[in-house]
């Protein structure tokens, strides 16, 4: 899993980061609400572990803003406030689960894994992304344009699917490298530009309307 842990208590943050990393997860961290919002905006995470009491923007407000923006990343709230009223407030703000401090890491790990499994099952139900006459089936890994099948390599499909999930939104080369290639991939490589060219030959070149657009100095966007 790609996890984001948002916690302003350094010792707890270190324990959580180490525990999830040892379980072969890719872990990112933030210590305040503003940084967390920026990271969620710029990168894709499978689950967000979110403390309620944070500097700048608290966890409840982060939930509200994400859901208002139609971002439905699974969120587990960590709260020292265990009253029913506080728990209900968090869930109504858009959190998927909560855990009251103090807690055992094993329980947190189990709850995070349950959220991830549930989100994967929900994702599988949403099979097709449609952009104009382009259809992308995420589960079958098939692509059609104007009713014609288009054969892509695994990496070409992953790149196209990432662009499609962000339809209408500009994504930078670094964001593409983080989400389509390994996060430690050489950032100076031109592999993104090369694969965009490959995609254009198959997705755009045979058709009159172009879907993949270059935004100079910013990155790429797919849109009608």
Image: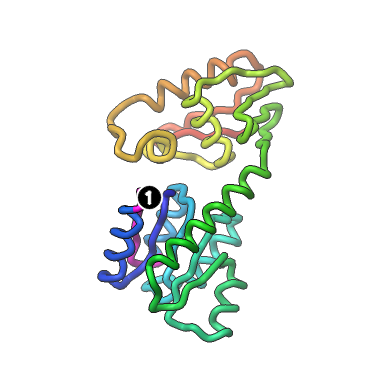
Residue on which disc 1 sits: 25
Graded by Cα atoms within 10 Å as few (under 14), some (14 to 19) or many (20 or more), the crowding at tag 1 reads some
Which colour scheme appears in the figure? rainbow
Reply yes or no: does residue 31 show up in magenta.
yes
At 40% from the left and 75% from the top, the residue drawn is 103
Residue 9, given in percent of the width and then of the height, sits at 30, 72
Q: Residue drawn at (58%, 84%), measured in percent from left and top? A: 85
Residue 128: % across, % down: 68, 36
Residue 105 percent location from the top left of the image: 38, 67
Magenta-span inclusion, residue 147: no
The secondary structure type at the circle numbered 1 is loop
Judge whether 88 appears above or below 163 on screen: below
Q: How many marks?
A: 1
Q: Is residue 177 above or below residue 78?
A: above
Q: Nearer the viewer, residue 126 or 108?
A: 108
| Spot occupied by residue 166 in the image (x, y as percentages of width and height) | 55, 41
Q: In percent of the image, x 55 and y 20: which residue is there?
A: 152
Q: Nearer the viewer, residue 36 or 75?
A: 75
Q: Nearer the viewer, residue 115 or 222?
A: 115
Q: As rendered, which of 80 and 19 lies closer to the eye?
A: 19
Magenta residues?
Answer: 23-33
Identify the image quadrant of the C terminus.
top right
Q: Quadrant of residue 107?
A: bottom left
- Residue 174 in the figure: left or right of residue 137: left
Q: Along the horizontal axis of the image, is 69 left or right of 100?
A: right
Q: Residue furthest top?
A: 206
Residue 37, quarter of picture: bottom left
Q: Is residue 224 visible?
A: no
């Amino acid at each position: 899993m790609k996890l984001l842990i948002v916690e302003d208590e350094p010792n707890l943050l270190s324990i959580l980061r180490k525990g999830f990393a040892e379980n072969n997860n890719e872990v990112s961290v933030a210590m305040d609400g503003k940084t967390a919002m920026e990271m969620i905006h710029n990168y894709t995470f499978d689950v967000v572990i979110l403390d309620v009491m944070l500097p700048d923007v608290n966890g409840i407000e982060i939930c509200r803003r994400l859901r208002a923006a139609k971002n439905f990343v699974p969120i587990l709230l960590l709260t020292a406030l265990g009253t029913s009223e506080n728990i209900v407030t968090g869930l109504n703000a858009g959190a998927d689960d909560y855990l009251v401090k103090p807690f055992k890491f094993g329980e947190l790990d189990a709850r995070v894994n349950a959220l991830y499994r549930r989100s994967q099952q929900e994702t599988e139900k949403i099979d097709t992304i449609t952009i104009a006459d382009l259809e992308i089936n995420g589960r079958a890994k098939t692509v059609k344009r104007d009713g014609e099948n288009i054969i892509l390599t695994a990496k070409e499909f992953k790149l196209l699917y990432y662009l499609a999930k962000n339809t209408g939104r500009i994504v930078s080369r670094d964001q593409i490298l983080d989400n389509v290639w390994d996060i430690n991939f050489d950032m100076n490589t031109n592999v993104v530009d090369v694969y965009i060219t490959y995609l254009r030959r198959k997705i755009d070149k045979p058709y009159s309307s172009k879907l993949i657009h270059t935004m100079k100095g910013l990155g790429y966007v797919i849109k009608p």
